[in-house]
Amino acid sequence: MRRRHPRNRVQAQEDTSSSSYEVDQDSDVVNRNRSISVSSTHSRSSHEITTLPPPRQRRKRKKRKSTSEKKQSKNVTVKQKISNIERALVHLEDEISESLSDEASDQVPKKCFGRNQLRESAIGIGGLITDDLRRKVWPRLLNIDLVETSVSLSDEEVKKNKNYNQVLMDVNRSLKRFPPGISDEDRPELQDQLTRLIIRVLDKHPELHYYQGYHDVAITFLLVVGEEMSFHILERLSTGPWLRVSKI
């Protein structure tokens, strides 16, 4: 048997220790890599958790009103406005009575707040709501005496007016403005009333000049308050600043 040289034994020990060191070192590197991988994974997952957006809060949906509820709300609003108009009319009557008594006693007449309330109702949403209220409010807004009367014109006097032909042409064109509920039998009479109404105003005030579109204003009052009250309203509007050419 061959005997190993001591130097070779030492070399073998060194090689063994060296290889074991390399194994230890490699395992150390592997362990270190694992720890780094685990820690990076942990840090990434924790980062992802912390950066997640907050959960969305559910918005409370507003309950939509049904059609019946809307109609009911609208009816309440209309009833409230009608009530306000009627109260303003009563208020105005009281103020007119007080004003007349103040004038009789040589005192300064009080302001008519009732008329201002009626004016605001007329220009507001929905206007004066019904024709019945319009018949009451329009004369009051223009401060018309409800018992005042005037002499009408005969058919011959109407035809003699210089504006008759032009007025008649425009009135004949205004058939489209008549409500559909008016029968064909009643239309000629309504046209005669409209022509007479306009000629009455122009005949009483020769300084006025007829213009196209005037009949549209006249028929609006005629359909609501009738010929006699329409004459007083149209006369007041025509002699005031409302139906005149604005001066710039």
Image (cartoon, helix red, strand yellow):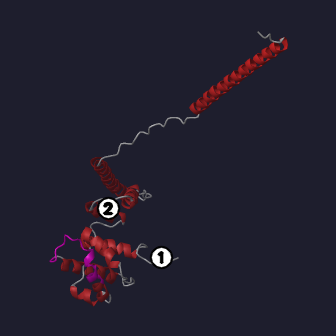
Residue that appears at 27% across and 85% down:
168
Q: Position of residue 109 (x, y in %)?
A: 42, 58
Residue 177 left/right relative to 16: left
The span shown in magenta is 170-185
- Tell me: residue 184, above or below residue 76: below
Q: Nearer the viewer, residue 106 or 85?
A: 85
Q: Position of residue 51 (x, y in %)?
A: 58, 34
Q: Nearer the viewer, mark 2 or mark 1?
A: 1
Q: Amino acid at mark 1?
A: Ser
Q: Position of residue 180 (x, y in %)?
A: 21, 71
Look at the image and tell me whether residue 150 can be seen: no
Q: Position of residue 202 (x, y in %)?
A: 33, 82
Q: Which residue is mark 2?
A: 137
Residue that appears at 66% across and 24% down:
35
- Identify the secondary structure beneath mark 1: loop
Residue 1 left/right relative to 157: right
Q: Which residue is mark 1?
A: 246
Name, please, the residue furthest toward the front: 1
